[in-house]
Structure formats: C-alpha cells, structure tokens
Image: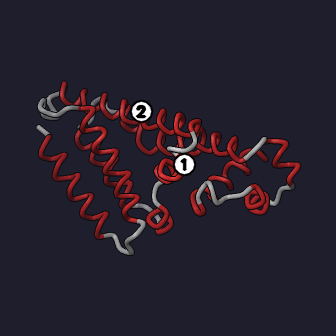
Amino acid sequence: KTQDLILNKSFELFYRKGFNKTTIPDIMKETSLSKGAFYHHFKNKKEVGKKVINGIITNRILNGFINPLMDYKNKNIPELILNIFTERIKHFSEKEKLQGCPANNLINEIGCNESEFRVLLRSLMDNWIDVLSKTITEGVKAKQISKNVNPKALAICLIGSFEGIRGIRKIYDNDELFNNYVLGIRTYIVNISI
C-alpha cells in the first residue's frame, strides 16, 4: 500500500536524519514516488509525522513494552519487568545503538515546539507509565514487590532511565554503558523484590 510505504520510509528518514532535516523530496526519493503520489495521501510532512507517531512508533512501544506488561497474570512480575527493561536492550542492532530511541529522538527534537506532536507523544508516554505503574501495583498486591515502592515513581524511573540510556549510548562506541545500565536495573529490581 502506498500510504504504508510513505510512512515506513518516512519513519526510517526521521530516525536517521531527524524530523526537521527530512524533506518531502527526501521522502519522494526514498519511496520512488512522485510529488503527486505523496500529496494524494498526505497534505504535508506534519501529517506524515503524526501518522508515524500514531502508527509505527506507538506500535513499537505497544509491542515491546506495554502489551508484555499487561500479560502479568501468573507470572513473576519483578522478573517480567526486569526482562522487558534489560533483555530488549541486549539485542539492539548497531543502528539502534547509534541512533537511539525513535520516540525519544522526536521528543527531544520537536516535542516542545510542535503542540500536536507533544500531545501524541505525551499520550503514548502516559499510557506506558500507567500500564507499568498498574503492573507494579499488582506486584505489590501479590507480595512480589515491596510495599514501600511507589508504583508510579518506579514506573517513571524505569522508563526515564531506559529512554535516557538510549540517548546517552549514541555518544559512545561500546556497550559498557548498556552493560552497567542492565546491572543497575537488575540490582534495583532484585532489591525491591520479595
């Protein structure tokens, strides 16, 4: 489908070059589509950006983080959280290590300037924080996580550290930073587990 081609190639361009530096001619070149074909599906780059956030970026976070968190019944919740926040990072490609997190990149690049993008990205982050917080709460109720833990604060801390390490890793050329992040998260989760 032409619209999906435009969205997928635009996502790749936004990830590689950034939203602001990507032009409609760049998108046309990557897709081998004419200007008319582009404008038949989208009125401008901003519309493409919103659909990339609502589609590709949202699905990456849903599939990688939110949906697995919702599947906590009959599971060791601390282990589930630990796996979500550490195993994924161990399997990033070199490209993912060098380019960071697509959602975080957009937040840093345009989150404060584009109100429509800010609303979409904030909604995505709020959903992630909410689901993680609820999962942590279930861990407390199941006596798997210490009752001294503030679920929302822990959710924000875990997501913030994950997103932060993805950004910081962009300036390093080895995995020592990731390895120490994994060790730190593992130590913390073990210490709050019952």
Towards the viewer: 112 or 67:
112
C-alpha separation, residue under disc 2 versus residue under disc 1: 18 Å
In this rendering, the label closer to the viewer, 2 or 1 = 1
Percent of width and height locating residue 94: 47, 69
As displayed, is residue 150 above or below residue 172? Answer: above
Tell me what residue is drawn at x 54 percent, y 35 percent.
120
Residues packed near mark 1 inside 10 Å, few (<14), some (14 to 19) or many (20 plus) = some
Percent of width and height locating residue 52: 62, 44
Residue 110 has which mark?
1
Percent of width and height locating residue 174: 35, 74
Q: Amino acid at mark 2?
A: Asp
Q: Could you tell me which secondary element the residue under label 2 belongs to?
A: helix
Q: Is residue 40 left or right of residue 117?
A: right
Percent of width and height locating residue 162: 34, 51
Which quarter of the rendered picture does the N terminus lie within?
Answer: top right
Tell me what residue is drawn at x 78 percent, y 63 percent.
29
Residues packed near mark 2 inside 10 Å, few (<14), some (14 to 19) or many (20 plus) = few
Q: Amino acid at mark 1?
A: Ile
Q: Could you tell me which secondary element the residue under label 1 belongs to?
A: helix
Q: Earlier along the polypeptide chain: callout 2 or callout 1?
A: 1
- Specify the quadrant of the image occupied by residue 78: top left
Q: Is residue 139 left or right of residue 71?
A: left
As displayed, is residue 118 above or below residue 99? Answer: above
Tag 2 residue: 126
Tell me what residue is drawn at x 47 percent, y 36 percent.
122
Towards the viewer: 20 or 182:
20
Towards the viewer: 108 or 31:
108
- Specify the quadrant of the image occupied by residue 194: top left
